[in-house]
Amino acid sequence: MIVKMKFLSISGPRTDIDRVCDVYLSKYEMQLENAIAELKTTDNLLPFVEVNPYKEPLAKAEEFMALLKDGAVQPDLSQDQDQMIGMIRDLNHEYLELIERKERLKKHEEMLKEKLNVLEPFRPLGVNLHDVMNYRYMRVRFGRIAVDYYRKLEKYLFEDLNAVFMEGTRNENYVYGCYFVANADASKADSIFNSLHFERITLSKDYIGTPVQACESLQLDIDHAREQIQDVEDEITELIRSRASQLAGARRRLEELSNNFDVRKMAARMEEGEGKEDYYILCGWMGEKDVEDFLKEAEHDDRIFIVVEEDREKFFGEPPTKLKNPKLFKPFEMFIRMYGLPAHDEMDPTMFVAVTYTFIFGAMFGDVGQGLCLFALGGLIYLKKKMSLAGIISIAGLFSTFFGFMFGSVFGFEDVLPALWLRPVEAMTNLPFIGQLNTVFVVAIAFGMALNILVMLFQIVNAVRVHDTENLWFSNNGVAGLVFYGFLVLTVVLYMTGHKTPGNILLLIFLGIPILLFLFKEPLTNLVKHNHKKMEGGKVMFLVQGFFELFETLLSYFSNTLSYVRIGAFAVSHAAIMEVVLMLSGAQDGSPNWIGVIIGNIIVCMLEGLVVGIQVLRLEYYEMFSRFYKGSGREFKPFNNHSKDH
């Protein structure tokens, strides 16, 4: 059902707005509206322009909590506002110092890695780096040369180049190494090497020992730096962990304070002049029961003034929609939200959908074993994950189980249980004019006719609520449509059961008059409302358009009723599909392959369950909702997520 909403205006001293939000509004669900936009008739209204002071400490608290890896933490709620902000400030100071140390260590590690990467290609060289870099009469150049040029280099070395090249490592592109040359021949050797695109690589003069020893020393330094970084990370973790409960409490409280402060975005302030305290104004929607409790709680508080607006002309827009249904029907609100929430003056179809959806699903998918599986699996998922769809599947599984007993089917076996009603494939009914027809088809059409009449009654109720004269009296889903379709159903039922049908005069009255009302519903509505409106396009155009609309209306009655045949069709097809599964598994021969039976049941349960679920939803949306439900409401969105504990 829909919770009745009331529009409130709350005002008080400007400095008291945080207390009101914290003490009162945090306990109740209220959808705030923009006070400046809603209260246009009130003069001197100004917006709040203050910056939320809780955003930054809240962001820091969330950042620190994200660093915790211990899961849930019991919050410490004993701190006041100043203590929380001071604790976060001090913690942030210590945290930033540790982060700065960590960054310095990381830079040092990166520098060591770069040195190691530079030195690594020269690891095979068996020279003392410190010695060769300090020779007096000889020059040493480290670097790399492309493989193709290295071949040319070998030629020069063997002929007239007074230099020695020591090869380090090589890859598919380059040869790494160094060349030795006397001081006197250095210029010539450098020129030749440069012409062969030798790329010099500068090594530090601080290395001791061979390249292998230098690399090992660098690796030790890198490992030590990593250990220091890990030590700092452990310090950070320990620092956050030591304040975990305080942080959890601060985050929760700061979130409340921040949300309460953000109420100013929807509030207005009213300047009272020099020497007087400014006032705030909040306005919005609240459930009727919450309004009563709110007024009762605040009746002795002289710093808050509450006005419940009774005259709807003072505010704009329609009340938001808040659904409140018993827990059993709560999951089915998902289908209502998918289609559209009801308006405040429209009936809530949640319970109707819950009953009809599960009942039709069960009739189309009647099997004791598979129904119990759906009930158990859906129930477990719903209890753990609170998924609405899982709850719907669970309840639908109960109805599948019920119809499984009615049809005498358990996991496709129809010789285990007796059918309490009928076997869908076997049961036949003799009808006048038509002949033999499957019984479940007949029952499905009769059930569809009853549902059509019921949803027309719903449409009449909705039309009465909104004082919609046209849809109440003259539409194909109003009183005229109910008389037409109801009399047609009565005539068909009497004929099929062998009773005497109404005479021509009654047919003319109960079918002819509603058709005329369908055709002339617009001018008749204008006549009832005393609205002297001329026909657009002239009388001929009106009659042509009305004829086609009338034809579409009569066709919709026929197609809408026949759509319910799918209920019987799926009941029969389910039995037939399971018969095929059992036949392929060898069950009909008396020696079933139980693995095949299980796999077949799983596949049928999943695929057919999905198809049946979609088909039933189609019936709900297109055959039922289209006759009485608009779904034009807007969702109730309270400014906070706290619910009152009654």
Image (cartoon, rainbow, N blue to C red):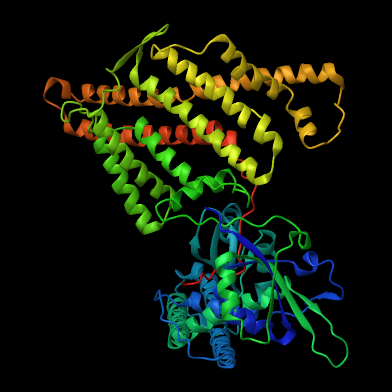
- Residue 461 lies in quadrant: top right
**Percent x, y of residue 210:** 45, 78
The answer to whether residue 615 shows anywhere in this view is yes
- Residue 9 lies in quadrant: bottom right
Which of 596/579 is in front?
A: 579
Quick check: 403 left or right of 77?
left
**Percent x, y of residue 598:** 23, 35
Which of 140/589 is in front?
A: 589
* For residue 46, above or below residue 623: below
Q: Residue at x 52, y 72 (%)?
A: 119
**Percent x, y of residue 329:** 43, 50
The answer to whether residue 140 shows anywhere in this view is no
Which of 367/432 is in front?
A: 432
* For residue 157, above or below residue 274: above
**Percent x, y of residue 353:** 47, 42
Q: Residue at x 61, y 59 (%)?
A: 636
- Residue 97 lies in quadrant: bottom right
* For residue 141, above or below residue 636: below
Q: Residue at x 27, y 33 (%)?
A: 404
The tally of labels here is 0
* For residue 522, above or below residue 214: above
Quick check: 519 left or right of 572?
right
Which of 452/65 is in front?
A: 452
